[in-house]
């Protein structure tokens, strides 16, 4: 058997310092190693052209390597100072928002050319929809406790009580959040260090990831932009629970945030996996109410700690408005018809269309039972008629309802990041709908599905990009397909 040729540039596990020269879709910075053997490409996620970074090689082939970012040694000349603490969840917060938009637009359109086989995608481009709030836009944040912290001066891990986020590249290590990160509620984050101090004074241990032991695990906060109220969830193990006074902790939060506190919950999670809410755990209301109310485009939605809801609700309004514009562009194709809303989640898009169309029946389908239950409750709360929701796998639902074939004019698709499974996509195509409005949180899988839709006779009429997550590599797309 021939001996495998060794990589002449890098090896797996090696730590390298490299200058980032280009940007690829998904936030992958591109660096290049040049030596007597030639040129070798290195991809490092969450980096920018002009940055000198330290990274660790995770995968390597003859022509390229994929690395994990460890540290930014020198910033890009494009970066500016911001008054926020840097966190792994906002790698581009120092890059002006206009440049973020440009990187996202260029790399996404290139993706549709390369994977979707749409060479003239620029002619289909409709709009880049920016977030109304580039900062403090999130309505939920999960902070983790750790018994191992990170000393930013010494650049090494240390034994200390921490509450914040995991240090980039160090799964066992927490990094204290001492002030506003620029993503969530500034008042909450500026008080996080005092909440940490309160918990530390109890003498109970934070979670020690390598040892899989400890008491404090997570501190989760949800926020309503409609009411500005807050819902807290403290996640701990059951060990030493009698030594912690949950009522006193709730009173402390009310002291800090006053009538903004809608409720305080406590979750027990004794599993060793890295999940905030364990499958075998319990959740209990300690103070106040277990839900908050949010508003989207004039409709009210009750949100529990477990509910799925758009993380950037103000931008979600603009996303949904664009979806509805596409769906109702030819209103005669919607009025007095049946519209299928597949992968509907909590049914927001269907509810908005039903509220604007005439005598239209919306059929929402999603495999997540709790999402469908929320959809039914929200539709009832908003007194919108003409809605039916089903808990089902989309592929199986279409198998069981052949009556929709050739009888659907407008179809809404909003799948998860993995896109639409090939077998399910064939069933969607078989419906022979005139128009598809395809929403995606992962343009890579949407571009893949685009090739199949075009082969089936659909053409892209319009494409918009929506910046739901400023300061990250994520971008959402809304594409209108019509039968050629």
Image (cartoon, grey):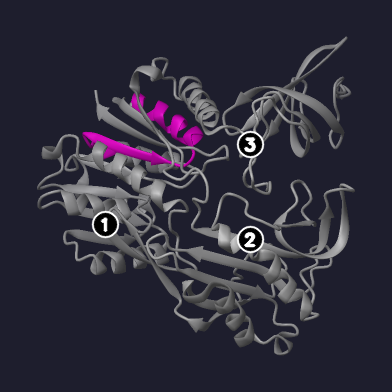
Mark 1 neighbour density, 10 Å: few (under 14) some (14–19) many (20 or more): few
Q: Is residue 92 left or right of residue 227?
A: right
Measuring 44% from the left and 64% from the top, which residue is drawn there? Answer: 228
Q: Specify which label sits upstream in the sequence, 2 or 1.
A: 2
Q: Is residue 163 left or right of residue 141?
A: right
* Residue to which mark 2 is pinned: 190
Q: Position of residue 109 (x, y in %)?
A: 46, 23
Residue 436 within the magenta-colored segment of the rendering: yes
Label 3 to label 1, Cα distance in Å?
A: 34 Å
Figure quadrant of residue 129 = top left
Figure quadrant of residue 82 = top right
Q: Specify which label sits upstream in the sequence, 2 or 3.
A: 3
**Given the current orientation, which residue lies at the most extreme bottom position?**
242
CB within 8 Å, label 3 to label 1? no
Taking depth in this image into account, of 174 and 365 the one nearest to the observer is 174
Taking depth in this image into account, of 45 and 387 the one nearest to the observer is 45
Regarding mark 1 in the picture, which secondary structure is present there?
Answer: loop
Measuring 26% from the left and 36% from the top, which residue is drawn there? Answer: 326
Q: Which mark is residue 240?
A: none
Q: Which mark is residue 94?
A: 3
Regarding mark 2 in the picture, which secondary structure is present there?
Answer: helix
Span highlighted in magenta in the image: 430-455
Q: State which mark lies toward you, 3 or 1.
A: 3
Q: State which mark lies toward you, 2 or 1.
A: 2
Taking depth in this image into account, of 146 and 239 the one nearest to the observer is 146
Figure quadrant of residue 11 = top right
Mark 2 neighbour density, 10 Å: few (under 14) some (14–19) many (20 or more): some
* Residue to which mark 1 is pinned: 298
Q: Specify which label sits upstream in the sequence, 3 or 1.
A: 3
Q: Please tell me whether residue 8 is drawn above or below residue 225 in the rendered image.
A: above
């Amino acid at each position: 058997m021939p001996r495998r040729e060794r990589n002449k540039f890098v090896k797996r596990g090696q730590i390298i310092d490299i200058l980032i020269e280009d940007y690829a879709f998904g936030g992958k910075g591109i660096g290049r190693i040049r030596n007597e053997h030639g040129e070798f490409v290195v991809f490092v996620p969450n980096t920018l052209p002009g940055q000198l970074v330290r990274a660790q090689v995770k995968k390597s082939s003859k022509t390229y390597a994929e690395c994990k970012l460890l540290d930014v040694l020198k910033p890009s000349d494009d970066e500016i100072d911001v008054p926020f603490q840097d966190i792994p969840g906002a790698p581009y917060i120092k890059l002006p928002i206009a440049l973020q938009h440009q990187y996202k637009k260029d790399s996404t359109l290139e993706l549709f050319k390369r994977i979707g086989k749409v060479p003239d995608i620029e002619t289909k481009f409709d709009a880049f929809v920016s977030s109304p709030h580039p900062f403090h836009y999130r309505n939920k944040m999960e902070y983790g406790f750790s018994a191992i912290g990170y000393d930013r001066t010494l650049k090494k891990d240390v034994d200390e009580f921490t509450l914040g986020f995991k240090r980039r590249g160090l799964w066992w290590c927490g990094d204290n959040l001492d002030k506003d990160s620029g993503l969530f509620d500034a008042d909450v984050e500026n008080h996080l260090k005092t909440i940490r101090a309160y918990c530390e004074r109890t003498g109970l241990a934070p979670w020690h990831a390598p040892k899989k032991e400890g008491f404090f695990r997570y501190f989760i906060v949800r926020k309503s932009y409609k009411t500005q109220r807050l819902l807290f969830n403290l996640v701990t193990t059951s060990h030493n629970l009698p030594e912690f006074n949950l009522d006193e902790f709730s009173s402390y939060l009310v002291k800090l945030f006053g009538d903004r506190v809608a409720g305080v919950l406590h979750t027990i999670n004794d599993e060793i996996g890295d999940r905030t809410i364990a499958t075998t755990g319990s959740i209990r209301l300690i103070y106040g109410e277990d839900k908050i109310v949010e508003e989207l485009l004039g409709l009210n939605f009750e949100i529990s700690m477990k509910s799925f809801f758009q993380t950037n609700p103000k931008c979600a309004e603009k996303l949904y408005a664009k979806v509805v514009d596409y769906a109702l562009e030819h209103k005669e194709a919607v009025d007095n018809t049946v519209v299928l809303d597949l992968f509907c989640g909590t049914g927001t898009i269907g509810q908005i269309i039903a509220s604007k169309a005439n005598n239209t029946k919306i059929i929402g389908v999603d495999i997540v039972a709790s999402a469908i239950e929320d959809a039914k409750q929200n539709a009832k709360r908003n007194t919108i008629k003409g809605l039916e929701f089903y808990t089902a796998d989309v592929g199986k639902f279409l198998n069981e309802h052949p009556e929709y074939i050739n009888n659907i004019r407008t179809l809404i698709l909003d799948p998860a990041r993995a896109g639409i499974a090939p077998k399910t996509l064939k069933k969607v195509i078989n419906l022979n709908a005139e128009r598809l409005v395809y929403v995606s949180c992962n343009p890579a899988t949407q571009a893949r599905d685009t090739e199949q839709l075009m082969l089936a006779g659909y053409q892209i009429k319009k494409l918009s990009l929506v910046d739901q997550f400023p300061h990250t590599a994520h971008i959402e797309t809304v594409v209108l397909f019509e039968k050629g």
